[in-house]
Amino acid sequence: MTVHWRKGVLVAIFMGTALTALGQTLPPEVVRYADLVLHNGKVLTADETFSIQQAVAIREGQFLAVGTTERILSMAGPQTLAIDLAGATVVPGFIATDADNEFAGGNLYKATQIRGELLGTLRVYKREDIWARMQQLLKDVPAGEPVFLRFDNDAAPTELTSFTKEDLDRLAPRNPLMATAGGVETVVNSLMMEKILELLPKEHPHILKDEQTGQPNGRIYGFALGVVGWDLRPWPRIDDSYLNEQKQNIQEVLGKGVTTLVGHIQGFTVSVLNLLAHQGELNIRVRGSHDFLRQNPNSEAFLRRIGNLVDFGLGDLVKIIGAGLESLDGAADHGSALTLRPKVSSGGFAYGPYGKNDWVGDRRSWDDPTVDRSKTEWASVMAAIKYGWNFSSIHNVGDGATAIWLEAVEKGLSQPDLVMKPQFRPFGLDHNHFWNASQDDKVKEFDVRRGLGKVFSSPGMALEMYGESIHDAQPVPELIEKGFKVHIEGAEPLEEIQRYVTRKDEKGHIWGPDHAVDRKTALLMKTLWAARFIGEDHLLGSIQPGKLADLVVLGEDYLSVPDSRLAQIPVVMTVVDGRIVHRKGM
């Protein structure tokens, strides 16, 4: 593995060696001791050989050395903070991908927003209850103020979308109104439609029409939904409430050992993080795929204005790792995953046998010759690749969706007017419940790196819809044997590790026990291989000299506790960039 050293470290080593040979005293500005030393423990480095050491030294935000307690203590000086681990286990900092829910306003574009305030997802499901909840929320809202309501995914597509534009007109005659289930199935009233038509032509295919009149019926998706979510929605004021919310979210995940958050981010989140960083209050790493192209009908114009910003950021703490784009499909739990094989049954949901394609919101097939791909998110993918952007942190569940993403990458890279080839970061897809061996060669050819979403949370429903084949979802040992260093998603690291070691979900159901992994592999999947997903395994994910100093001290022995107790291992210390940012019971 290539180790990336800072120039100052190399100079110090060279000068120290040279001056010592000459018998001269070294000035303190040239050589300094470690800032932090952890010793007398069990350091699981999670390097490629999974070496186990006794101690680790940190200096200037990087790992200086690992080794025996005696050797590492020799690097401690008068100002070094030395901590006796008393046998405790040390692991690399956990990397949480698909972590956009940890960002304040992380899903602003589809969140409930009333009077400028962001509220949670509305969890009512029956038609009459949805109507009553909307009436309650709209009461006393000032005339002219837009209202955005987000209901849970289970409210779509049968309940929420049974409402018409005229229904919402009666409900909100004075306010532009959008009601969405999960940010996909969406209906708007006439006042909101008027605003959409100021930015998109009425003929746009993402504005659905009444079959009799040919007029907009209130149903929108794709670019039209993007206009509402991104262009018409006002930002809340970034005040102490949002800053405190973000700091609280960060502190909670630090307490779980998460040192890097990875996910799609939008302008509002970037602004919150920027403000925290400039106030010296950002104490976690963030790697974000920026949503500026997501559902954007003017993607190429935006790209020409801003250029390629991949790897731009705030030092080593915050970096843009690619472009966020609209997902193609839904979830396995709802039967909306886009698959190449049909489901066994619908499970009571209104999706077709192969799931759904959110880029074609009127339920036509992707191969339907009447589908104009240039009027879908496909155009944004082509534009992103043309200007050297990779995509990352993309929601992707079914192998049918994977097939379209692979086709898009292939077409994008072969564009004759390619301005610059994506070269800074890999392409990345989240979740990936359904794997198809026929796609392996293309995945490797285009270096499309893929994560593993959690084992199904609705086991009975998944079994009903997909049959016994659901047990072969995410065949991890087989994938690793093929050379895919897949990683585990989420911001509950030890719980997620336990899930892939046992293949047992939160309800106690076991899914494909033959596809379980050992705990050493699971640790790599949550650290080094998670860093590889974003192209930073040379900087993050293992405890090796020269890498950024992120680590976690555990309250129990990771290698010896029973499988059923992995999720209960306490995190007693978290270190980010060489600084202790969480400490409890040590």
Image (tube, grey):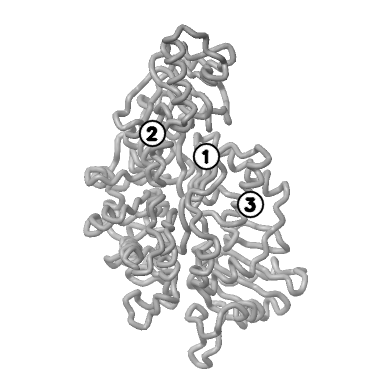
Locate residue 392, reporting x and y percent: 43, 54
Distance (Cα) linking label 2 and label 3: 41 Å
Q: Residue at x 52, y 29 (%)?
A: 61
What numbered label is drawn on residue 564? 2
CB-based contact (under 8 Å), mark 2 and mark 1: no
Q: Is residue 111 left or right of residue 153?
A: right
Distance (Cα) linking label 1 and label 3: 17 Å
Whichever of labels 2 and 3 marks the residue nearer the N terminus, that label is: 3
**Looking at the image, can residue 471 be seen?**
yes
Which of 127/541 is in front?
541
Q: Residue at x 69, y 76 (%)?
A: 172
Locate residue 583, reporting x and y percent: 57, 26
Q: Secondary structure at mark 1?
A: loop
Q: Which residue is mark 1?
A: 316
Q: Amino acid at mark 1?
A: Asp
Distance (Cα) linking label 2 and label 1: 36 Å
What numbered label is drawn on residue 271? 3
Q: Amino acid at mark 2?
A: Ser
What numbered label is drawn on residue 251? none
Q: Residues within 10 Å of mark 2 (few under 14, many from 20)?
A: few
Q: Quadrant of residue 412?
A: bottom left
Q: Nearer the viewer, mark 2 or mark 3?
A: 3
Is 179 situated above or below 278? below
Locate residue 336, reporting x and y percent: 40, 65
